[in-house]
Image (cartoon, helix red, strand yellow):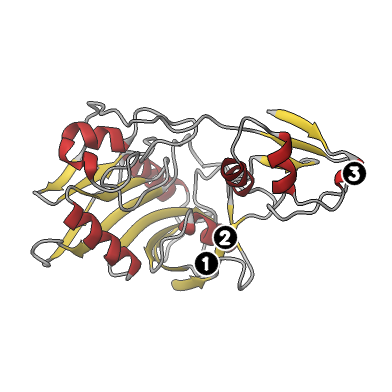
Amino acid sequence: MSALTVEPAAAGERLDRWLATHVQDVSRARLQTLIDDGHVRVDGIARKRAYRLQGGEVVDVHVPPREPDDLRPEAIPLTIVHEDDDVLVVNKPAGMVVHPGAGHAAATLAAAALAHAPVIATVGGRHRPGIVHRLDKDTSGLLVIAKTERAYESLTRQLVARTVSRRYAAIVHGRLAAGAGVVDAPIGRDPVHRQRMAVRAAGKGKRAVTRYRVAERFRDHTFLDVSLETGRTHQIRVHMASLGHPVVGDGVYGARRRPPIPFEGLALHAAALSFLHPASHDLQEFTASLPDRMERLLWHLRHNEAAGAR
């Protein structure tokens, strides 16, 4: 982290342009990315590239380590649900990062998949071979990986067309009254905390639609069946928190709510996944049972927060 003081003569200058002349060892494009990702703060507040400086402010710049130049395969065991010549469907455990990023250079799902199926090395991005969608680090469940360019292109098109079906099991804080509902609210970067997402006003974020159905109610929690019509970053977490019902274990969007028992990860699991096979075009449907951590939480709720109606 470096702290720079804006000289009075710079008043009115754009933040990104000012940084480009004061941080010599980082490219302008990299600086713009740092601003967008919330790594640049003006008097402690994340600002946009076009923010006009006033003079006298203190600008803090944090440059996280870059992703490694080459993704190295790592022989990490995978729970394989299905595999053929075109696709690999895995059940990701909570705690595993999907692809390398700042602070997570090793022990990723991408590295494990590359070790299992070296053929994916040239499919998709260099740091995320074969990866067409992702799950948060602390979310478990189903994820499909493309093993060929044909599969990558097909699955990417299906995701854009919203024909890939993804259904999640979630345990949230609070007792939802309605048996089912839809959250249709745009999601974009939090204007203050740039590493977080938030529900934004129309025109400030991308359209995001989440459907949910109550599977079981407890005194202070609700077990939900959730499906996505769109795939925005942290979508379920942001939408449920916006309703006042954050996902159990979410220290970002539900920091003030504590799990009723010791709990690792998020109470969020990608339980069902379906798509058209890239080669046969047949509908492929897969399911993954709840992980033990969520089963233990449900057992606790059923025995300590019994509240009746499903």
Residue placed under numbered mark 3 in the picture:
9
Which residue is label 1 attached to? 206
Callout 2 secondary element:
strand
- As shown in the figure, which amino acid type bears the numbered disc 1? Lys
Q: Give the residue displayed 52% in from the left and 62% down from the top.
A: 239
Helix, strand or loop for disc 1:
loop
Callout 3 crowding tier (Cα within 10 Å): few <14, some 14–19, many ≥20: few
- Tell me the residue at 27%/50% (across/down): 142
Quarter of the image for residue 152 reads bottom left
Q: Amino acid at mark 3?
A: Ala
Place of residue 6 in the rendered image (x, y in percent of width and height, measured from the top left): 84, 39
User: CB of mark 2 within 8 Å of CB of mark 1?
Assistant: yes
Left or right: where does residue 44 sit relative to residue 178?
Answer: right
- Foreground mark, 3 or 1? 3
In the rendered image, which residue does mark 2 sit on? 188
Which of discs 3 and 2 lies nearer the camera? The answer is 3
Q: Identity of the amino acid at label 2?
A: Gly
Residue at (90% x, 44% y) in the render: 9
- Earlier in the chain: of badge 2 and badge 1, it is 2
Q: Is residue 156 left or right of residue 174?
A: left
